[in-house]
Amino acid sequence: MRSAYLAKRLTRPLPTKDGGTLRTVAEVRAYMVALPKDRELSARWQHAAELLLAEADVGAFSKQIELALFIDAKLDVGPDMEHETLVAHRRATTLTW
């Protein structure tokens, strides 16, 4: 995987309930490597891994990561992000869960 791809910033920072904020593809990769097996094997994280390995468009990758975090109840949705996140996820019905 190219370091230029890993250095790319997500479309927006994704605060997690695990205590961190994911800002770059590299940070997401590190987060994904540390996932418990049950989460890692879910379709949503498998799809995220496929996007990562394909060095997919960062916008599509960011959306998939946000969706996976949201479904796992790990996205720290504060008041500023709550409405925007909920609207985005209602539109995400075509994404792989």
Image (cartoon, rainbow, N blue to C red):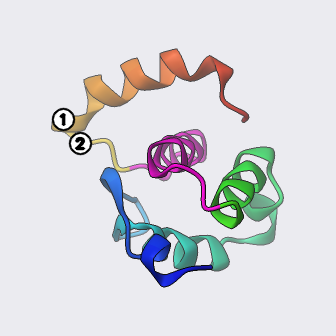
Residue visible at 72% across and 35% down? 97
Are there few (<14), some (14-19), or many (20+) residues within 10 Å of tag 1? few
Q: Magenta part of the protein: which range?
A: 55-75
Report the side of 10 relative to 54 (left or right).
Answer: left
Q: Is 89 covered by the magenta stretch? A: no
Q: Is residue 12 left or right of residue 38?
A: left
Give the labeled residue for mark 2.
78
Q: Position of residue 27 (x, y in %)?
A: 44, 75
Q: Residue 96 bears which disc, if any?
A: none
Say whether marks 2 and 1 touch (CB < 8 Å).
yes
Q: Dividing the picture into quarters, in which one does residue 93 lie?
A: top right
Label 2, label 1: how far apart the Cα atoms are: 4 Å
Instruction: Please identify the residue farthest to the left as the structure is shown.
Output: 80
Q: Main secondary structure of the magenta part?
A: helix
Q: Residue 1, percent across and down?
A: 62, 79
Q: Position of residue 2 (x, y in %)?
A: 55, 80
Q: Relative to residue 59, is residue 6 depicted above or below?
A: below
Q: Amino acid at mark 2?
A: Gly
Q: Residue, x 80% and y 70% (percent of image)?
A: 37
- Disc 1 marks a residue whose amino acid type is Pro
Q: What residue is shown at x 40% (from left), y 59% (from top)?
A: 17
Neighbours of disc 2 within 10 Å: few (<14), some (14-19), many (20+): few
Residue 61 at x, y = what percent?
54, 49
According to the image, label 1 marks what residue?
Answer: 79
Q: Secondary structure at mark 1?
A: helix
Residue 61 shown in magenta: yes
- Left or right: residue 24 versus residue 68 is left
Q: Is residue 28 above or below residue 59?
A: below
Quadrant of res 50? bottom right
Q: Residue at x 23, y 42 (%)?
A: 78
Q: Secondary structure at mark 2?
A: loop
23 horizontally vs 38: left or right = left
